[in-house]
């Protein structure tokens, strides 16, 4: 079994199953360079307890405007002696791995993971990222991407060979998320009772309230639909810098009785919201992937997903609809179509919410086999 070393920012809930799956294919060690996800405050003790691989932290080094360099990377590499090393995105960490190899200080296969959607690939936001990507891609042995569409982009744009690209969407294990069904159902029933959700079509959003999610624009676009459909309610689970802007739009559009903001949740308390949902919406105008869509599908909830999200590549007609949140006519049209596909919340029973996710385990192993047997 080959040794795989991954340098990764910090552990998020949607990464646990991916790392555990890799631990079945490799002798895996993950080195985290932050003690938590910078824009979240996840319960790291709980998450780390679920990992089935070795891990450690490198937290010493300069930090500037989101960019970080960690001392001790070369020491970790020499100590583990991995066969393959992965950085993340086109970060200083990845650039440093490239430099170490060019200087002859390491000789392993090196690669990086990138969560960019096809939309982001085609529209790089900054000159520095454009140059970092251009420099890295031509010197890496592997590139780990989240969709076949992105894989084809790199093959076409940078002339990469198919065997250099590993397609590995950020998927979670349905069995893990759906565990503790009785507790999930009890929590969901409390939500439904507290917020009077029974008999209503509940359109759910889960995530950060940040400009990229475009929640104020989405609310304004569907205002008329919300007011016209008496049994429709929009539930926004989360928090963030756009909370005030969201409150302002709700007040201006007189939607106080149509939109609920219950707050931010984690773990079982978060997953229980999917049991209360008729449908799920992700209206992002910028979204590298969108793991919440995977979660919604796992809980049998159809999705109305932005075409700008990387996860859109996984949504077919049996799982929901795609829409462009930048186009008001398309948003309204798809919203009305989506509402005809979903039903009001009745009995909350997890057994009635069959997972809509396909089984990707064999394909996952096949893709990573490129690195295992190279």
Image (spheres, grey):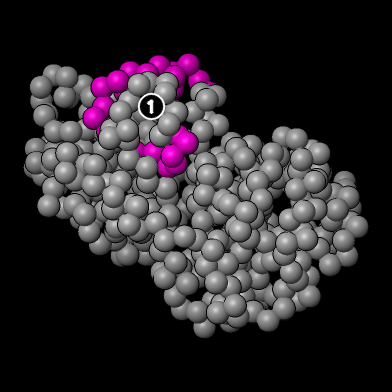
**Residue 300 appears in which quarter of the rendering?**
bottom right
For the C terminus, the image quarter is: top left
- Where residue 209 sits in the image (x, y, percent)? 63, 47
Q: Nearer the viewer, residue 71 or 48?
A: 48
Which residue is rendered at x = 35% and y = 58% of the image? 361
In the displayed structure image, the side of residue 337 where residue 311 appears, left or right? left
**Residue 214 appears in which quarter of the rendering?**
top right
Q: Is residue 30 magenta?
A: no
Q: Is residue 139 magenta?
A: yes
Which residue is rendered at x = 40% and y = 16% of the image? 131
Q: Nearer the viewer, residue 181 or 258?
A: 181
Q: Give the residues drawn in magenta, as a range.
A: 125-150
In the displayed structure image, the side of residue 211 where residue 104 appears, left or right? left
Query: Can I make out residue 174 in this image?
Result: yes
Vertical relation: 362 (above or below) 351? above
Query: Can I make out residue 213 in this image?
Result: no
- Where residue 1 sits in the image (x, y, percent)? 12, 52
Which residue is rendered at x = 51% and y = 33% of the image? 118
Vertical relation: 160 (above or below) 172? above
Number of marks: 1
- Where residue 270 sits in the image (x, y, percent)? 55, 65
- Where residue 139 sits in the image (x, y, percent)? 26, 22
Vertical relation: 240 (above or below) 48? above
Q: Which residue is mark 1?
A: 155
In the displayed structure image, the side of residue 22 where residue 291 appears, left or right? right
CA neighbours of label 1 inside 10 A, class few (<14), some (14 to 19), many (20+):
some
Vertical relation: 90 (above or below) 287? above
């Amino acid at each position: 079994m080959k040794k795989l070393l991954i340098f990764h920012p910090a552990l998020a809930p949607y990464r646990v199953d991916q790392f555990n799956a890799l631990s079945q294919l490799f002798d895996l060690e993950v080195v985290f360079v932050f003690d938590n996800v910078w824009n979240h405050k996840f319960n790291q003790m709980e998450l780390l307890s679920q990992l089935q691989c070795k891990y450690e932290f490198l937290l010493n080094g300069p930090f500037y405007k989101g960019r970080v360099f960690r001392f001790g990377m070369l020491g970790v590499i020499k100590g583990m002696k991995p066969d393959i090393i992965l950085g993340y995105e086109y970060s200083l960490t990845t650039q440093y791995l490239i430099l170490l190899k060019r200087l002859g200080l390491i000789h392993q296969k090196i690669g990086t993971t990138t969560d960019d959607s096809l939309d982001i690939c085609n529209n790089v936001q900054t000159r520095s990222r454009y140059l970092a990507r251009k420099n890295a891609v031509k010197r890496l042995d592997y590139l780990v991407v989240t969709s076949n569409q992105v894989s084809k982009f790199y093959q076409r744009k940078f002339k990469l060979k198919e065997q250099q690209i590993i397609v590995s969407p950020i998927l979670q294990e349905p069995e893990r998320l759906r565990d503790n069904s009785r507790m999930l159902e009890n929590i969901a029933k409390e939500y439904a009772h507290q917020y009077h959700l029974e008999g209503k079509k509940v359109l759910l959003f889960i995530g950060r309230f940040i400009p990229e999610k475009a929640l104020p624009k989405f609310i304004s676009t569907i205002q008329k639909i919300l007011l016209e459909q008496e049994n429709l309610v929009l539930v926004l689970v989360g928090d963030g810098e756009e909370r005030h802007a969201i409150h302002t739009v709700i007040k201006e559009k007189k939607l106080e009785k149509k939109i609920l903001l219950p707050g931010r949740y984690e773990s079982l308390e978060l997953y229980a919201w999917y049991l209360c949902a008729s449908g799920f919406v992700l209206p992002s105008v910028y979204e590298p992937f969108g793991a919440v869509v995977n979660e919604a599908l796992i809980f049998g909830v159809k999705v109305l997903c932005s075409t700008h999200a990387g996860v859109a590549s996984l949504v077919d007609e049996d799982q929901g609809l795609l829409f462009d949140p930048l186009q008001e006519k398309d948003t309204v049209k798809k919203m009305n179509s989506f509402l005809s596909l979903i039903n009001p919340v009745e009995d909350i029973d997890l057994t009635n919410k069959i997972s809509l996710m396909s089984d990707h385990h064999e394909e996952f192993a096949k893709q990573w086999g490129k690195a295992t047997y190279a």
